[in-house]
Amino acid sequence: MNINLPPLPQPLPDQLLQQLSPGALAYLGDAVYELYIRANYLIPPKRLHLYHSLVVAQVRAETQARHLRSLAPHFTPAETEIVRRGRNAATGRPKRLSVSIYQQATGLETLIGYLYLKDPERLTYLFAQLEIEKDTSVVDYTGL
C-alpha cells in the first residue's frame, strides 16, 4: 500500500534549479526519499523500534541502488542524465560499500531531489513504481 504524501512545493524555475549542484540535489533527495519510506510504514501502526528497523532496511544504499535499477526503464532521457550527473558527482563512500552501489544510490537521491523541485507529479509517479518491501511478520499494534 503506497501512502500519498501531502502536496509538494511548486516547481522551481529552471534558472534557480540549474544553480544547484548534484550534491545539493542528492542531499535533498535523501531526505525526501526517507520521508516517503517512513510514510509507507505507518500503517498498520507499529512500535517505534520496528518503524526504525524497517526504514533503515529501505534507505540503505544497497536498496536505493536496487530501486534505481528497477526504475531505470521508466526514466526519460533527461532523468537518465540527472542520474548520471549524480553518480559522477558521488565522492567518497562508506567502507562497507562498493563504489558502484554508492554511485547508484547517489544517482537516485539526485533524481529524487531534482524531481521534488522540478516536477513533483513525476516524482509521485516514480515513487508509485517502487516496490517497498513489507515485513509480513509485523504485529499490528492498532489497539495500543
Image (tube, rainbow, N blue to C red):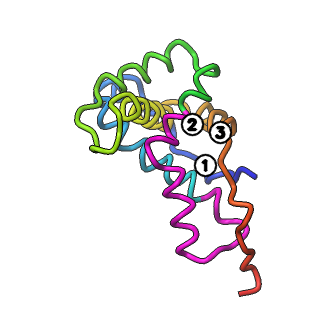
Amino acid type assigned to the residue bearing label 2 in the image: Pro
Residue 142 image position (x, y, % from top left): 75, 79
Q: In what quadrant of the picture does the C terminus appear?
A: bottom right
Residue 57: image x %, image y %? 52, 54
Q: Quadrant of residue 131?
A: top right
**In this view, 133 is above or below 91:** below
Residue 131 in the figure: left or right of residue 97:
right
Q: Nearer the viewer, residue 109 or 53?
A: 53
Q: Which residue is mark 2?
A: 120
Q: Mark 1: which secondary structure?
A: loop
Query: What type is the residue that disc 3 sits on?
Result: Leu
State how far apart marks 3 and 2 are (Cα). 16 Å
Cβ atoms under marks 1 and 2 closer than 8 Å: yes
Residue at (65, 65) in percent of width and height: 42
Closer to the camera, 92 or 15?
92
Query: Disc 3 vs disc 2: which is toward the camera?
Result: 3
In the rendered image, residue 71, in percent from the top left (x then y), is placed at 60, 28
Q: Tell me how far mark 1 sits from mark 2, CA to CA.
A: 8 Å
Question: Which mark, by number, is residue 130?
Answer: 3
**Left of 20 or right of it: where is 50?**
right
SS state under label 3: loop
Q: Amino acid at mark 1?
A: Pro
Outermost residue, left direction? 92
Q: Which residue is mark 1?
A: 7
Q: Where 35 falls versus 114 (above or below)? A: below
The magenta stretch spans which residues? 39-67
Q: Indicate which disc, 1 or 2, sits on the residue closer to the N terminus.
A: 1
